[in-house]
Image: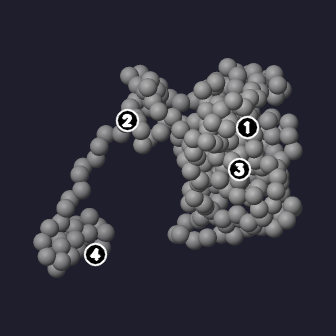
């Protein structure tokens, strides 16, 4: 099975203090520590497990700049067979649709049975996987937390839905899936694995290589434009109820009545 996993390099929130810049157009990115997007890491692990069971290859791809190559190498050190960097000044400022268009062009250069993305990345929109599937006219499932290959034509997919319920679907291949955290336990990437891929050449595909018109992506092609970044004003603090259990219950009932929660 030929599997393509879309990954992204994002600020590591466990290593950084995220602040909005002065003009409110972005976060302060100087001296940030970056890592692979958490959801994408689960997607790569799932792809590797599928390959190990049924055979095939796992390719990781990212849209970004030269420094974004590091997440491609990291996922290759984890066990992916190959990687590709999609990089061009024309891609800068792309919205979700633009990123999906770039990925679509790369997909059409190969022959893939399955495409995995993380459920969302640092911008939180969770839209690229669905847009990519729509552009390819392939089946799509989001928030996937269970995946079982039936044969080379169908897979079983479990989805996390409201209320903690699980939805099971049979999906035709090829398809696109957005992977939820918790579907597996991503393996540790050791120094040996990192050294093994350190000297491997990572192909770089530009807009010309992909046959993408420069005005179809990037800022000029974006239908969604960021207007502002801001930190919301903090609300009032929580009220802590003290006393015995009976006293706390009585106070809670009074508060709920006062707020119209109960009559």
What whole-number distance in Å separates the C-alpha atoms at marks 2 and 3?
30 Å
Numbered-mark total: 4
Tell me which residue sits at (58%, 46%) in the image: 189
Secondary structure beneath dot 2 equals loop
What whole-number distance in Å separates the C-alpha atoms at marks 2 and 4?
45 Å
140 is higher (above) or lower (below) than 24: below
Residues at circles 2 and 3 in contact by the CB criterion of under 8 Å: no
Secondary structure beneath dot 3 equals strand
Secondary structure beneath dot 1 equals strand
What residue would you read off at disc 1? 83
What whole-number distance in Å separates the C-alpha atoms at marks 3 and 4?
50 Å
Tell me which residue sits at (57%, 45%) in the image: 190
Would residue 2 be visible to someone looking at this image?
Answer: yes
Quarter of the image for the N terminus: give it.
bottom right
Q: Can you give x and y, in whole percent of width and height, for residue 121 in the image?
A: 57, 43
- Tell me which corner region of the image, top left, top right, bottom left or bottom right, holds residue 220: top right
Q: Earlier in the sequence, mark 2 or mark 1?
A: 2
Label 3 vs label 1, nearer the camera: 1
Q: Earlier in the sequence, mark 2 or mark 3?
A: 2
Is residue 10 rendered to the left or right of residue 140?
left
What residue would you read off at disc 2? 17
Furthest residue to the bottom? 246
Q: Say the numbered circle drawn on residue 263.
A: 4
């Amino acid at each position: 099975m030929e599997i393509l996993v879309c990954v992204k390099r994002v600020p590591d929130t466990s290593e950084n203090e995220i602040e909005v810049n002065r003009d409110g157009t972005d976060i302060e990115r100087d001296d940030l520590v970056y890592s692979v997007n958490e959801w994408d890491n689960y997607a790569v692990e799932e792809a590797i497990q599928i390959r190990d069971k049924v055979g095939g290859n796992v390719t990781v791809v990212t849209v970004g700049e030269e420094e974004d190559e590091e997440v491609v190498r990291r996922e290759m050190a984890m066990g992916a067979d190959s990687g590709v960097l999609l990089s061009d000044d024309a891609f800068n400022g792309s919205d979700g649709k633009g990123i999906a268009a770039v990925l679509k062009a790369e997909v059409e250069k190969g022959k893939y049975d399955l495409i995995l993305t993380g459920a969302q990345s640092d911008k939180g929109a969770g839209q690229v996987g669905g847009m990519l599937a729509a552009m390819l006219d392939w089946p799509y499932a989001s928030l996937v937390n269970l995946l079982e290959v039936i044969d080379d034509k169908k897979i079983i997919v479990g989805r996390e839905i409201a209320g903690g319920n699980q939805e099971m679907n049979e999906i035709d291949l090829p398809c696109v899936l957005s992977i939820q955290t918790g579907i597996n336990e991503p393996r540790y990437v050791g120094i040996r694995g990192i050294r093994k891929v350190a000297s491997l050449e990572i192909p770089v595909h530009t807009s010309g290589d992909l046959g993408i018109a420069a005005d179809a992506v990037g800022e000029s092609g974006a239908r969604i434009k960021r207007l502002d970044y801001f930190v919301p004003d903090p609300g009032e603090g929580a009220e802590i109820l003290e006393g015995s259990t009976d006293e706390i219950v009585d106070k809670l009932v009074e508060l709920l009545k006062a707020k119209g929660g109960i009559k």
